[in-house]
Image: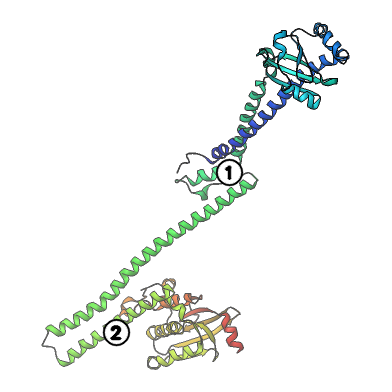
Amino acid sequence: MSIKFPYRYRLLLSLFPFFLAFALLIIGVAFRREKKLKRDVINTKLESFDAILSPQLKRADTLLQAKAPEIIHALPKGIRFSIIKSDGELVFDNTLTSEQMGDDHSNRPEVLKAKKEGRGTDIRVSKSNQKPYIYYAKLYPKGYVVRFSLPYDDELKDFLSFDNYLIYSLVALLFITLFLFHLIIGKLVRPIRKVLSLTQEKDESLSSQDMDFEDNEIGVIAKNILTNYRRLEQSQRQVDIEREQSIKLKQEMTGNIAHELRTPVTSIRAYLETLETNNSLSKEEQDKFIQKAHDQSIRLSNLIQDISILHKVEQGEEKSSFEVFNLRGVLDNVFDDLNEPLTRQQIDLDVQLANKLPFFGNKNLIYSVFRNLTENVIAYSGEGARIIIKLYKEDKQFYHISFADTGVGISPEALPRIFERFYRIDKGRTRSMGNSGLGLAIVKNVIMLHDGSITAQNRVGGGLELLISLPKHKILDLVIKS
């Protein structure tokens, strides 16, 4: 996925109004300050004329009026000079005729300021001759106001206008600042862009990339993002592998189940069809076929029951039925239920467990574990074998139990596979005994359901030994103390 508008440009765009507002504020402040300074320069110049003529202007009123024409000759050319009485009457103005001097000047802004503050200034169009002037007025004794004015012409306008060089400088500074921010932001987001570019490369794994990031907060964030992405990538690969294995395992199990179900079903059907179509069978032969059909139905029932148990164990459905029980009592029940085949095979029992061995788990499933193991000894160890069960180690977390027999053992090649579903060492022999091939798979899954482990090894001196580790539970501490 391509990014149409990168983050750094959006950040710059969001910052631009603030920089622009700041620049405009500076321009406005500078404009007002420069204008004030230039007006102060003009006012100072006009005030200097007043300072030069002040001795003459402070004389009596009649002299003030009489000497006004002489004062004009002492002023630079272009200066307008006016004298206004306390009542606002314009008594002298070097730019006006006697007919134009009849206006009341008491309401002129510069005159009002002079009467109020002693001095007053203003820029406006004269109401007397309709020309723009910059005025400076000063209050003298007896309420007289003396006013000096400069024509507000193009030359003076240019002097008072804002210097465009400052505007150009501030605009250039604005863009230079934005450019610098662009470079800084680009440097800050460079680690993130590196990670982004890697995440968009579909043909190359991130785990094969080795990147250096800057030693700052953004670099640390980028490293963490890359690390987490690599972990996610590895996890995804592992999930994909497990999914493929699960699909393959389900396919194999479906095929195995179909094959295992087909055998007893086909046999039952064949026996029943023989009984139905062959009327010449003797009573003894009919009983024989019925017995065989019955044996196959039992095998089919056991197979379905084993599949059901295995499914429930794998789904963890039996964890809700956990309880505290005596492990030794479960073993005694197994041996009582299998007493007849054990006696027939002359199998000796050597149980080296305490009479009370509390355990927290599913009692029925633990029963199925030891029953499956015992039935395997009966089926494969031959007559006169011996079963040895002992607690060879106990610690704070586990019971470590050994379940061994003195039979023929298992070949080293077959040993790693005995816990696989439907795996048989001697397929023909186990089928004839009605074995489903799921017994040890159920054993292993039940032990794992209880967070335990089981391993198999050939016993020194002959036979098979299964090492079972069953975890203790915190609830057992309360049971043992009670």
Near-viewer residue (281 or 458): 281
Up the image or down, 242 lies above or below 149; here it is below
Quadrant position of residue 153: top right
Q: Residue at x 49, y 56 (%)?
A: 234
Quadrant position of residue 62: top right
Kindly identify the amino acid type of the residue bearing the numbered disc 1. Answer: Pro
Q: Is residue 389 visible?
A: yes
Up the image or down, 152 lies above or below 302; here it is above
Q: What is the number of callouts on the image?
A: 2
Q: Quadrant of the C terminus?
A: bottom right
Q: Position of residue 343 (x, y in %)?
A: 40, 94
Q: Position of residue 404 (x, y in %)?
A: 48, 83
Near-viewer residue (452 or 197): 197
Nearer to us of marks 2 and 1 is 1
152 relative position to 372: left or right: right
Badge 1 crowding class, 10 Å Cα cut-off, few under 14, some 14 to 19, many 20 or more, is many
Q: Position of residue 48 (x, y in %)?
A: 82, 16
Dot 1 falls on a residue whose secondary structure is: helix
| Residue where numbered disc 2 is placed | 298
| Residue where numbered disc 1 is placed | 191
Kindly identify the amino acid type of the residue bearing the numbered disc 2. Answer: Ile
